[in-house]
């Protein structure tokens, strides 16, 4: 049984999706053992506590830079015996020392179909605002491995969501979460815990 550590910064809706999937028995060979927040008082920590999951706060604002923060976060991950690490609304960019310590063990969910609308600065409502401005007809969500390139790691799963004529960034954000993010993130985490993802030539394959 692998230890899943979830990194959060805010409300924890994706964390809740993982918890719900775990309680339905959909995450195989893994369990969420700890939630780490980069912000004090994040509601995600309350969600964890309600389900008996350990919560730790490591405030980003207490550190001078990302590297110093990452060094201490790495110590916590090692102490918690992390096997799989999930970014769930985690808004802090980490130093490469974390990626190097956990190659192909860290995953993130992005609210668009990578390689579109991704990279530095594309997060939260801005993604959906740009999607609507561009006038694309389909968006969605992507679960990918975390590497030292922002949103550049191998893609694990994607799910498309159709855009409606009357969508706003807020309505689109909610529908992408409900129809895509909350479905494929638990699926990808389970695949990783089951050792069913293979990397070949920089691409991820389900086996």
Image (spheres, rainbow, N blue to C red):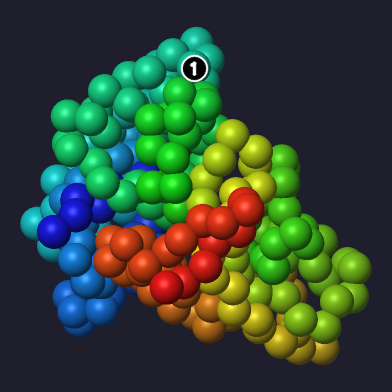
Residue furthest top as drawn:
64
Residue 50 at least partly seen? no
**In front: 83, or 207?**
207
Question: Residue farthest to the front?
Answer: 200
Judge by depth and name the residue closer to the eye, 10 or 152. Answer: 152
Quadrant the N terminus occupies: bottom left
Q: Residue at x 22, y 36 (%)?
A: 56
- Between 26 and 7, the residue placed more toward the observer is 26
Residue 38 locus on image (x, y percent)? 39, 34
Helix or strand or loop: what does disc 1 sit on? helix
For residue 188, side relative to residue 127 (left or right): left
Q: Is residue 67 visible?
A: yes
Measuring 46% from the left and 72% from the top, which residue is drawn there? 206
- Count of numbered circles on the image: 1
Locate residue 121 relative to residue 94 in the image: left or right. Answer: right
Quadrant location of the C terminus in the rendered image:
bottom left
Which residue appears at 72% of the width and 53% of the height? 118
49 sits left or right of 63 in the view: left
> Image quarter for residue 188?
bottom left
The residue singled out by tag 1 in the image is 67
Q: Position of residue 157 (x, y in %)?
A: 54, 71
Location of residue 192 (image quadrant): bottom left
Q: Residues within 10 Å of mark 1 (few under 14, many from 20)?
A: some
Please name the residue shown 20% across and 62% down the image: 30
Relative depth, front residue between 38 and 192: 192
């Amino acid at each position: 049984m692998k230890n899943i550590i979830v990194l959060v910064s805010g409300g924890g809706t994706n964390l809740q999706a993982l918890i719900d999937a775990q309680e339905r028995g959909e995450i195989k060979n893994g369990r969420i053992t700890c939630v780490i927040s980069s912000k004090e008082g994040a509601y995600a920590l309350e969600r964890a506590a309600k389900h008996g999951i350990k919560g730790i706060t490591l405030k980003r604002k207490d550190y001078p830079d990302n590297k110093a923060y990452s060094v201490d976060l790495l110590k916590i991950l090692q102490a918690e015996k992390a096997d799989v690490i999930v970014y769930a609304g985690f808004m802090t960019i980490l130093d490469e020392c974390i990626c190097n310590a956990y190659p192909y063990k860290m995953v993130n969910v992005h609210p668009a179909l990578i390689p579109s609308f991704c990279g530095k600065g594309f997060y939260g409502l801005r993604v959906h605002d740009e999607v609507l401005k561009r006038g694309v007809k389909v968006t969605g969500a992507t679960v990918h491995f975390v590497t030292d390139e922002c949103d550049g790691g191998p893609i694990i799963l994607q799910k498309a969501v159709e855009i409606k004529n009357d969508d706003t960034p807020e309505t689109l954000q909610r529908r992408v979460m409900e129809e895509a993010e909350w479905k494929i993130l638990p699926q990808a985490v389970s695949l990783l815990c089951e050792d069913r993802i293979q990397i070949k030539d920089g691409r991820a394959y389900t086996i």
